[in-house]
Image (cartoon, rainbow, N blue to C red):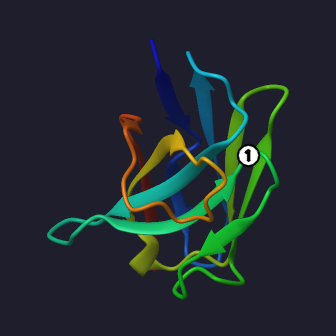
Amino acid sequence: EVQLVESGGGWVQAGGSLRLSCAASGFAFNDYAIAWFRQAPGKEREGISCITTDDGRTYYTESVKGRFTISSDNYENMVYLQMDSLNPEDTAVYYCAADRAYGSICPLPLYDYWGQGTQVTVSS
């Protein structure tokens, strides 16, 4: 059974940092695209970052570029999102998602597997 479990969310003041983790199980980790999405109250879900596990290529949406860093540990089947210089606009539920990449570049148009999400709250 494929499982994605996020952790590391919490409350932080503006300017602070958090590191989110996504633990993946139930599938071979190679040749997958693992993405981070977020959804703020009243807003649509937004894809913010992605990494392909076979070559480590990454993608960031403009709003997080230079502040967030995605990385993967293919031995531990983990993906991380280091979030620095957080601001209140980053407040959201953060989800990781995964799907086979078949050599494609992130981000993928669809993801079959999703985690339950972790709340990130940034206060001003």
Question: Which of the 4 quarters of the picture holds residue 15?
Answer: bottom right
Rendered location of residue 26, percent (x, y): 55, 15
Rendered location of residue 44, percent (x, y): 22, 69
Question: Which of the 4 quarters of the picture holds residue 31?
Answer: top right
Q: Is residue 33 left or right of residue 41?
A: right
Report the quarter where the N terminus lies: top left
From this view, report whether residue 105 is shown above or below residue 6: below
Q: Label 1 sits on what residue type?
A: Thr
Which of the pair 13/23 is nearer the observer?
A: 23
The outermost residue toward the left is 42
Which of the pair 100/36 is nearer the observer?
A: 100
The outermost residue toward the bottom is 62
Q: Residue at x 57, y 66 (%)?
A: 49
Q: Residue at x 20, y 65 (%)?
A: 41
Rendered location of residue 117, percent (x, y): 39, 41
Q: Secondary structure at mark 1?
A: loop
Q: Is residue 2 left or right of residue 81?
A: left
The outermost residue toward the top is 1
From this view, report whether residue 111 is shown above or below residue 108: above
Which of the pair 21/101 is nearer the observer?
A: 101
Q: Is residue 20 left or right of residue 111?
A: right
Q: Residues within 10 Å of mark 1 (few under 14, many from 20)?
A: many
Identify the residue under disc 1. 53
